[in-house]
Image: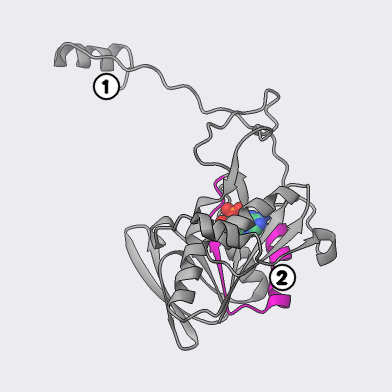
Amino acid sequence: MKVLVPVKRVIDYNVKIRVKADGSGVETSGVKMSLNPFDENAIEEAVRLKERGDASEIVAVSIGPQAAQEVLRTALAMGVDRAILVTTDEAVEPLGIAKALKEIVLTEKPDLVILGKQAIDDDMNATGQMLAGLLGWGQGTFASEVVIENENAKVTREVDGGLETVQLKLPAIVTADLRLNEPRYASLPNIMKARKKPLTTLSIADLNVDVAPRLTVVSVAEPAARQAGAVLGSVEELIEKLRNEAKVI
Ligand code: AMP
Protein backbone atom coordinates (compact mmCIF):
# COMPACT_ATOMS: atom_id res chain seq x y z
CA MET A 1 0.00 0.00 0.00
CA LYS A 2 1.30 3.42 -0.97
CA VAL A 3 0.51 6.43 1.22
CA LEU A 4 0.64 10.06 0.10
CA VAL A 5 0.96 12.76 2.77
CA PRO A 6 0.40 16.40 1.72
CA VAL A 7 2.20 18.78 4.09
CA LYS A 8 2.09 22.56 4.40
CA ARG A 9 4.73 25.05 5.55
CA VAL A 10 3.08 27.43 8.00
CA ILE A 11 4.09 30.01 10.62
CA ASP A 12 5.45 28.07 13.61
CA TYR A 13 2.76 27.56 16.23
CA ASN A 14 4.96 29.17 18.94
CA VAL A 15 5.23 32.45 17.05
CA LYS A 16 3.09 35.35 18.22
CA ILE A 17 1.22 36.40 15.09
CA ARG A 18 1.54 40.07 14.08
CA VAL A 19 -1.02 41.66 11.78
CA LYS A 20 0.44 43.87 9.02
CA ALA A 21 -0.01 47.59 9.63
CA ASP A 22 -2.30 47.96 6.58
CA GLY A 23 -4.55 45.05 7.73
CA SER A 24 -3.92 43.13 4.50
CA GLY A 25 -2.67 39.96 6.21
CA VAL A 26 -0.22 38.70 8.80
CA GLU A 27 3.50 39.39 8.90
CA THR A 28 5.51 36.46 7.49
CA SER A 29 8.87 38.04 6.73
CA GLY A 30 11.58 37.05 9.19
CA VAL A 31 9.13 34.73 10.98
CA LYS A 32 9.97 31.11 11.89
CA MET A 33 8.12 28.67 9.62
CA SER A 34 7.49 24.98 10.34
CA LEU A 35 5.55 21.90 9.36
CA ASN A 36 1.81 22.31 10.06
CA PRO A 37 1.25 20.45 13.39
CA PHE A 38 -1.66 18.30 12.09
CA ASP A 39 0.56 17.24 9.18
CA GLU A 40 3.06 15.88 11.71
CA ASN A 41 0.25 13.61 12.94
CA ALA A 42 -0.46 12.60 9.32
CA ILE A 43 3.22 11.73 8.73
CA GLU A 44 3.46 9.85 12.04
CA GLU A 45 0.41 7.75 11.13
CA ALA A 46 1.83 6.91 7.70
CA VAL A 47 5.16 5.89 9.29
CA ARG A 48 3.33 3.70 11.84
CA LEU A 49 1.34 2.05 9.01
CA LYS A 50 4.67 1.24 7.35
CA GLU A 51 6.17 -0.05 10.60
CA ARG A 52 3.09 -2.29 11.06
CA GLY A 53 3.60 -3.66 7.56
CA ASP A 54 0.41 -2.08 6.18
CA ALA A 55 2.20 0.50 4.01
CA SER A 56 5.14 -0.13 1.69
CA GLU A 57 5.98 3.41 0.55
CA ILE A 58 5.29 6.91 1.87
CA VAL A 59 5.50 9.97 -0.36
CA ALA A 60 5.15 13.52 1.01
CA VAL A 61 4.12 16.46 -1.17
CA SER A 62 4.14 20.18 -0.46
CA ILE A 63 2.87 23.04 -2.59
CA GLY A 64 4.56 26.31 -1.78
CA PRO A 65 7.74 28.36 -2.16
CA GLN A 66 11.17 26.80 -2.67
CA ALA A 67 11.68 27.09 1.11
CA ALA A 68 8.93 24.51 1.63
CA GLN A 69 11.58 21.91 0.92
CA GLU A 70 12.65 22.36 4.58
CA VAL A 71 9.35 20.89 5.81
CA LEU A 72 9.71 18.07 3.28
CA ARG A 73 13.18 17.31 4.70
CA THR A 74 11.60 17.15 8.17
CA ALA A 75 9.00 14.71 6.80
CA LEU A 76 11.81 12.61 5.26
CA ALA A 77 13.66 12.63 8.60
CA MET A 78 10.49 11.36 10.34
CA GLY A 79 10.38 8.33 8.02
CA VAL A 80 8.86 9.42 4.69
CA ASP A 81 10.61 7.69 1.75
CA ARG A 82 10.38 10.29 -0.99
CA ALA A 83 9.18 13.88 -1.42
CA ILE A 84 7.72 16.09 -4.13
CA LEU A 85 7.88 19.89 -4.01
CA VAL A 86 5.42 21.75 -6.24
CA THR A 87 6.70 25.31 -6.36
CA THR A 88 4.61 28.46 -6.42
CA ASP A 89 5.20 31.88 -4.92
CA GLU A 90 1.48 32.68 -4.85
CA ALA A 91 -0.85 31.90 -1.94
CA VAL A 92 -3.07 29.09 -3.24
CA GLU A 93 -6.54 28.47 -1.74
CA PRO A 94 -7.69 24.98 -0.66
CA LEU A 95 -9.57 24.42 -3.95
CA GLY A 96 -6.40 25.13 -5.95
CA ILE A 97 -4.34 22.94 -3.59
CA ALA A 98 -6.91 20.13 -3.91
CA LYS A 99 -6.81 20.38 -7.73
CA ALA A 100 -2.99 20.25 -7.73
CA LEU A 101 -3.02 17.32 -5.27
CA LYS A 102 -5.51 15.49 -7.51
CA GLU A 103 -2.94 15.63 -10.35
CA ILE A 104 -0.24 14.27 -8.02
CA VAL A 105 -2.64 11.49 -6.93
CA LEU A 106 -3.35 10.57 -10.57
CA THR A 107 0.40 10.18 -11.22
CA GLU A 108 1.45 8.61 -7.93
CA LYS A 109 -1.65 6.36 -7.54
CA PRO A 110 -1.58 6.10 -3.72
CA ASP A 111 -4.02 3.78 -1.91
CA LEU A 112 -4.39 6.23 0.96
CA VAL A 113 -3.92 10.00 1.27
CA ILE A 114 -3.48 11.28 4.84
CA LEU A 115 -3.70 15.06 5.28
CA GLY A 116 -3.82 17.23 8.37
CA LYS A 117 -7.35 18.18 9.38
CA GLN A 118 -6.48 21.85 8.95
CA ALA A 119 -3.63 24.22 8.33
CA ILE A 120 -3.08 26.45 11.37
CA ASP A 121 -2.40 29.55 9.25
CA ASP A 122 -5.70 29.80 7.36
CA ASP A 123 -7.78 27.36 9.49
CA MET A 124 -9.65 26.33 6.35
CA ASN A 125 -10.26 22.65 7.18
CA ALA A 126 -11.23 22.11 3.55
CA THR A 127 -8.44 20.61 1.42
CA GLY A 128 -8.95 16.93 2.34
CA GLN A 129 -12.71 17.17 1.82
CA MET A 130 -12.28 18.94 -1.54
CA LEU A 131 -9.70 16.40 -2.69
CA ALA A 132 -12.09 13.55 -1.79
CA GLY A 133 -14.83 15.31 -3.77
CA LEU A 134 -12.61 15.87 -6.83
CA LEU A 135 -11.44 12.25 -6.84
CA GLY A 136 -14.83 10.73 -5.91
CA TRP A 137 -13.13 8.88 -3.03
CA GLY A 138 -14.46 8.17 0.46
CA GLN A 139 -13.21 10.33 3.33
CA GLY A 140 -12.63 9.85 7.05
CA THR A 141 -12.01 13.30 8.53
CA PHE A 142 -10.76 14.23 12.05
CA ALA A 143 -9.31 10.74 12.51
CA SER A 144 -8.24 9.62 15.98
CA GLU A 145 -7.60 6.00 14.88
CA VAL A 146 -6.88 4.35 11.54
CA VAL A 147 -6.92 0.59 11.05
CA ILE A 148 -6.29 -1.06 7.68
CA GLU A 149 -8.26 -4.26 7.06
CA ASN A 150 -7.85 -5.88 3.63
CA GLU A 151 -9.18 -3.37 1.08
CA ASN A 152 -10.66 -1.06 3.71
CA ALA A 153 -9.63 1.60 6.20
CA LYS A 154 -11.56 1.76 9.45
CA VAL A 155 -11.41 5.33 10.72
CA THR A 156 -12.53 6.51 14.15
CA ARG A 157 -13.57 10.16 13.97
CA GLU A 158 -13.73 12.79 16.67
CA VAL A 159 -17.20 14.29 16.34
CA ASP A 160 -19.19 16.56 18.66
CA GLY A 161 -20.23 14.53 21.67
CA GLY A 162 -18.31 11.34 20.93
CA LEU A 163 -16.61 9.07 18.42
CA GLU A 164 -17.88 7.77 15.10
CA THR A 165 -16.29 4.85 13.24
CA VAL A 166 -16.56 4.72 9.45
CA GLN A 167 -15.31 2.08 7.04
CA LEU A 168 -13.81 3.37 3.80
CA LYS A 169 -13.05 1.37 0.71
CA LEU A 170 -9.49 2.09 -0.46
CA PRO A 171 -8.32 4.27 -2.12
CA ALA A 172 -9.52 6.86 0.37
CA ILE A 173 -8.79 10.17 2.09
CA VAL A 174 -8.09 10.52 5.81
CA THR A 175 -7.51 13.78 7.70
CA ALA A 176 -5.57 13.62 10.97
CA ASP A 177 -6.69 15.05 14.30
CA LEU A 178 -4.24 15.81 17.13
CA ARG A 179 -5.22 12.76 19.20
CA LEU A 180 -4.41 10.35 16.36
CA ASN A 181 -0.88 9.86 17.70
CA GLU A 182 2.14 11.55 19.26
CA PRO A 183 4.49 12.55 16.41
CA ARG A 184 8.11 11.44 16.85
CA TYR A 185 11.05 13.83 16.85
CA ALA A 186 13.43 13.42 13.96
CA SER A 187 16.71 12.09 15.39
CA LEU A 188 20.01 13.61 14.27
CA PRO A 189 21.08 10.47 12.31
CA ASN A 190 17.68 10.47 10.56
CA ILE A 191 18.02 14.18 9.74
CA MET A 192 21.40 13.38 8.13
CA LYS A 193 19.92 10.40 6.24
CA ALA A 194 16.99 12.53 5.05
CA ARG A 195 19.40 14.78 3.14
CA LYS A 196 20.10 11.87 0.80
CA LYS A 197 16.48 10.82 0.26
CA PRO A 198 14.95 11.75 -3.12
CA LEU A 199 13.16 15.09 -3.42
CA THR A 200 11.81 16.03 -6.83
CA THR A 201 10.71 19.54 -7.72
CA LEU A 202 8.16 20.69 -10.27
CA SER A 203 6.40 23.96 -10.89
CA ILE A 204 2.67 24.34 -10.29
CA ALA A 205 2.36 25.38 -13.97
CA ASP A 206 3.47 21.83 -14.92
CA LEU A 207 0.27 20.46 -13.40
CA ASN A 208 -1.92 22.52 -15.72
CA VAL A 209 -4.64 23.30 -13.20
CA ASP A 210 -6.55 26.52 -12.54
CA VAL A 211 -5.34 27.76 -9.16
CA ALA A 212 -6.58 31.33 -9.58
CA PRO A 213 -7.99 32.67 -6.28
CA ARG A 214 -11.76 32.76 -5.74
CA LEU A 215 -11.60 34.60 -2.43
CA THR A 216 -10.45 38.10 -1.56
CA VAL A 217 -9.27 38.89 1.96
CA VAL A 218 -11.11 42.08 2.88
CA SER A 219 -9.27 42.79 6.13
CA VAL A 220 -7.33 41.11 8.91
CA ALA A 221 -7.49 42.48 12.46
CA GLU A 222 -6.05 41.64 15.88
CA PRO A 223 -8.59 40.20 18.34
CA ALA A 224 -10.08 42.92 20.57
CA ALA A 225 -8.04 43.40 23.74
CA ARG A 226 -9.79 41.92 26.79
CA GLN A 227 -10.80 44.28 29.56
CA ALA A 228 -9.00 43.82 32.86
CA GLY A 229 -10.95 41.91 35.54
CA ALA A 230 -11.67 43.22 39.06
CA VAL A 231 -11.75 41.57 42.47
CA LEU A 232 -14.90 42.60 44.35
CA GLY A 233 -15.34 42.75 48.10
CA SER A 234 -18.82 41.29 48.48
CA VAL A 235 -21.79 39.66 46.77
CA GLU A 236 -23.74 42.92 47.24
CA GLU A 237 -21.05 44.81 45.31
CA LEU A 238 -21.19 42.19 42.52
CA ILE A 239 -24.98 42.53 42.26
CA GLU A 240 -24.72 46.31 42.23
CA LYS A 241 -22.16 46.21 39.37
CA LEU A 242 -24.15 43.66 37.37
CA ARG A 243 -27.27 45.80 37.75
CA ASN A 244 -25.88 49.33 37.26
CA GLU A 245 -22.61 48.89 35.30
CA ALA A 246 -22.99 45.82 33.11
CA LYS A 247 -26.80 46.22 33.13
CA VAL A 248 -27.33 42.47 32.72
CA ILE A 249 -29.77 41.93 35.63
P1 AMP B 1 -6.58 23.50 5.03
O1 AMP B 1 -7.73 22.96 4.25
O2 AMP B 1 -5.91 24.69 4.36
O3 AMP B 1 -6.95 23.80 6.47
O4 AMP B 1 -5.45 22.35 5.05
C1 AMP B 1 -5.75 21.01 5.41
C2 AMP B 1 -4.60 20.09 5.05
O5 AMP B 1 -4.39 20.11 3.63
C3 AMP B 1 -3.24 20.44 5.63
O6 AMP B 1 -3.12 19.96 6.97
C4 AMP B 1 -2.30 19.70 4.66
O7 AMP B 1 -2.26 18.31 4.93
C5 AMP B 1 -3.01 19.92 3.32
N1 AMP B 1 -2.51 21.14 2.66
C6 AMP B 1 -3.00 22.41 2.74
N2 AMP B 1 -2.25 23.27 2.03
C7 AMP B 1 -1.24 22.54 1.49
C8 AMP B 1 -0.12 22.84 0.66
N3 AMP B 1 0.14 24.09 0.25
N4 AMP B 1 0.70 21.82 0.28
C9 AMP B 1 0.46 20.56 0.68
N5 AMP B 1 -0.57 20.21 1.47
C10 AMP B 1 -1.41 21.18 1.87
**Would residue 210 be found to the left or right of residue 151 on screen?**
right
Amino acid type at image mark 2: Ile
The N terminus: image quadrant: bottom right
Residue in view at x 49 percent, y 37 percent: 14
Disc 2 element: helix
Residue in view at x 70 percent, y 31 percent: 24
Q: Please tell me which residue lies in front, 171 or 13.
A: 13
Is 198 located above or below residue 53 in the figure? above
Q: Residues within 10 Å of mark 1 (few under 14, many from 20)?
A: few
Amino acid type at image mark 1: Ile
Is 3 located above or below residue 124 in the figure? below
Residue in view at x 15 percent, y 13 percent: 236
Percent across and percent down for residue 118 are 54, 54
Mark 1 and mark 2: Cα distance apart in space: 60 Å
Q: Which mark is residue 223?
A: none
Percent across and percent down for residue 151 are 50, 87
Percent across and percent down for residue 157 are 40, 66
The span picked out in magenta is: 96-120
Q: Which mark is residue 104?
A: 2
Q: Per the image, is 34 magenta?
A: no
Which residue is denoted by mark 1 in the rendering? 249
Q: How is the image coloured?
A: one colour
- Of the two numbered discs 1 and 2 in the rendering, the one whose residue sits closer to the viewer: 2
